Image (cartoon, rainbow, N blue to C red):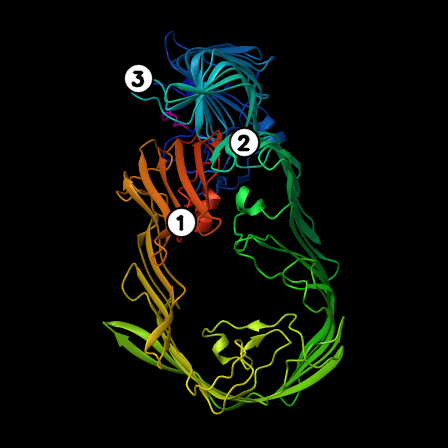
Amino acid sequence: MGQACAQWGRPIGSVPAPEPMGASGHAPGNTAAEPASNAPVPQWGTPLRGATPAGRPLAGAVPAAPAPLALSESGIALKISRSLQPPPTGEAAKLLPIAVQGQSLRGRPDLDAVVEGDARLRRGNLSITTDRLTYDQAEDLAVARGNVSITQDKNRYSGAELQLKTQRFEGYFLNPTYFFGRTQAGGTADRIDFIGPQHSVATNATYSSCPADGSGDPAWLLSSEQIDTDFDTNTGVAKGAVLRFLGVPILWAPELSFPLTNERKSGWLPPSVAIDSNAGVRVEAPWYWNIAPNRDATLTPSASLRRGVGLDTEFRYLEPTYKGQFNFNFLPDDNVANRSRYSLGVVHEADFSAATRLSVNIKRVSDDDYWKDFQREPGTVTPRLLLSDIQASHEMGDWTTYARVQRWQVLQDPDAQIITPYQRLPQIGVRTLQTLGSGLDISFEGEYNRFTNPASTIEAHRLDGDRVHTLTSISYPWVTTPGWTLTPKVALNAAAYSLSRAVAVSGNKKTSRVIPTVSLDSAWVLERETNWFGTDLLQTLEPRVLYVYTPYRKQSDFPIFDSAARDLNFETAFSENAFSGIDRVSDSNQVIAGAKTRLINPVTGAEVMRLGAVQRYLLSDQRITPLGTPLTRRVSDLLLLGSTSVIPNWTLGTTLQYNPQVNALITSTSGVTYSPSPFRTVSLIYRQVRGASQQIETGWQWPIYGRTPDLSGQADDGRGNLGTCTGSLYTVGRINYSTRDSRLVDGIMGFEYDAGCWIARVVAERLSTGSSNATTRLLFQIEFVGLSRLGSNPLQVLKDNVPGYRLLRDGPQATQSSNLLYE
């Protein structure tokens, strides 16, 4: 039987038979709401004129104060819209009309309406379909029985019986199944009570983001006596909760709180379990406190079978003019070491004004063995050398003044002791870099340092004292022709010392020196267009020649507070001094010559290939050297570099230091990376230092089963598996092996399984703490998509250690429609 549509108050028999209503309540094919005529629309309460033959299907609309229509001489002015606008919210939603539709409709004006047979009610973003629907206007109460389905603000419900006040969205639903569009998860319940558009309480409910498998149960399922979901506060609370994974109960909690979106929320986070060779089994239960949008804190009580109970604290803050983070990990009684253990970390940055800045960086631990017994912080390169300093700076035009207090804590190992750097208590200085109107560049740095010697056995003999130094240079970059720059430069390094005791060589406590340097730097940047294998490229040729002259000055009377030999690479090869810092200045009469060439894609700007070489030529012996013995070789080691990505999906690179005198490589680093698509990457690196070390490092992330998504979230077969429950298994890891010592230096190996609605990760990590000692950890985590994560998080470990590692959910997700009513 066909359907007929009408608005309350319009004679059914006086208008032509209308077209059936679409899902949006509009006639099919219309771009926007389009009235059947120019007649005014009567309000609720206008008598329904015209008799309705028995059994004739009806449909109706119950308008509530509709907005006036814009009239023109030719009728109603309509505006074409090429997209569906989301329904209004707030006060505007109260003005929305109610539309009803069904096989049979009857009602009493101003009182109620009864719709039977494929009954539908629509109000704004609320849609109800059922076998039978009654609506009470006075109470704004809709009662639906039989095959009831609701769609509301991305959420869907279906069940047997519903009572709902449509405007306030208050009522209940018996025996429903439900689905939340924001979390892409849902379940079943004996009853759901609606407390508002964004708040509901489900009784004897289940919750999961997985579809049911062949046996009728999803892969993971949260069962609870009551689940309270509040999207206004982004909080879901399950009482008497049991979490099952693959049918096995893995977690019970009297009350479990979980976020409904990725936004932050206060509450207990899921506990984590890790296995550590030093701590044994370690269990953590973090509590997160969302103090404010710009402040939060995490308190993590922990218990270790071997070491006891501890507490980790983290506090973060972000203000318009300052930001920072505070970390304090405390173990009051270590059962293994029989003492308290702690680590402290403070980072603070502040801008008091556009010209004045302050930074604080503090790292301290309780004892020398801390780095061995407790996991290394992510990103920590030298866990035995901890820096604490406070710096302040102020800019005044072209001048910058600064001050710093610096201290070091060295975690000593009796088998491999290292020298503690000097403390700076304090460091005060001023610097400037200016370009005069004539093109002359002038730089100046003046600084005072008080160097103190840490009280330790291996540094007890060292001098400490005060140093004042100035670094001054004047240069004139001379551009004669395009692509060529000639820069003469004169520099002066002056320093004066006041020491705590006399120097053994000279017997003086106060001493000073002034060392000049002159240089001439000639650099070219030449370009040409070329074509390689049918591809247009831009090739550069960049030769450079630097002459440096620094006279010899005896420096054995001066202490070494902050100087060290520079590593030889393409950046330091063109430096005027072989030392960093102030205390040592190498005498020099040499020419440094080098060149590099690059191939660049002119369209994308990507570098396709790079080749380079550099070498030093001594015109006289160098007497001030890092090893203390004069350097008489006239030709230095030759540095070579090369890198290319000309082969699609492949990247190759190498850096070599070659000694022509012994015809051998002194150092070399060579690597290759193959990455044909996202989530597929393999790298191999070989490093060697002649007579010291030889290491091979390999890292990878690669799928070994299932479909792999690309950056758009689509699987390689085009169907996509993100958000579905089709499984993909990945292997991931990094291994650093010493071929010289025939031992594993560091290693990470793990697997990740993405089932769409859950992700499992297991990672084993081995960190060396000495030539024969190591710490091993086992990290295991299950991520229940739409709920939370259980276990120790290995993601930071993977990102820090696996080259090219990409999060499985790093790609953009398919966006959900803002209004699920438009089906």
Type of residue at label 1? Tyr
Picture quadrant where residue 765 is located: top left
The spot of residue 24 in percent (x, y) is 43, 29
Q: Answer whether residue 348 is visible to the viewer in this image.
A: yes
Residue occupied by mark 3: 215
Region in magenta: 18-23
Q: CA distance from mark 3 to mark 2?
A: 42 Å
Residue occupied by mark 1: 805
Residue occupied by mark 2: 306
Question: Element at badge 1?
Answer: loop
The spot of residue 228 in percent (x, y) is 56, 20
Is 412 in front, or is 450?
412
The spot of residue 770 in percent (x, y) is 48, 51
Is 719 in front, or is 587?
587
Question: Element at badge 2?
Answer: loop
Is 118 in front, or is 110?
118
Q: CA distance from mark 1 to mark 2?
A: 33 Å
- Image check: 445 left or right of 662? right
Type of residue at label 2? Arg
- Image check: 156 left or right of 269? left
Is residue 609 depicted above or below 306 in this figure? below
Residue at x 56%, y 57% (from the top left corner): 417
Q: Earlier in the sequence, mark 1 or mark 2?
A: 2
Q: CA distance from mark 3 to mark 1?
A: 36 Å
Q: Answer whether residue 489 is visible to the viewer in this image.
A: no
Is residue 116 depicted above or below 754 in this figure? above
- Image check: 448 left or right of 640? right
Disc ID at residue 218: none
Picture quadrant where residue 570 is located: bottom left
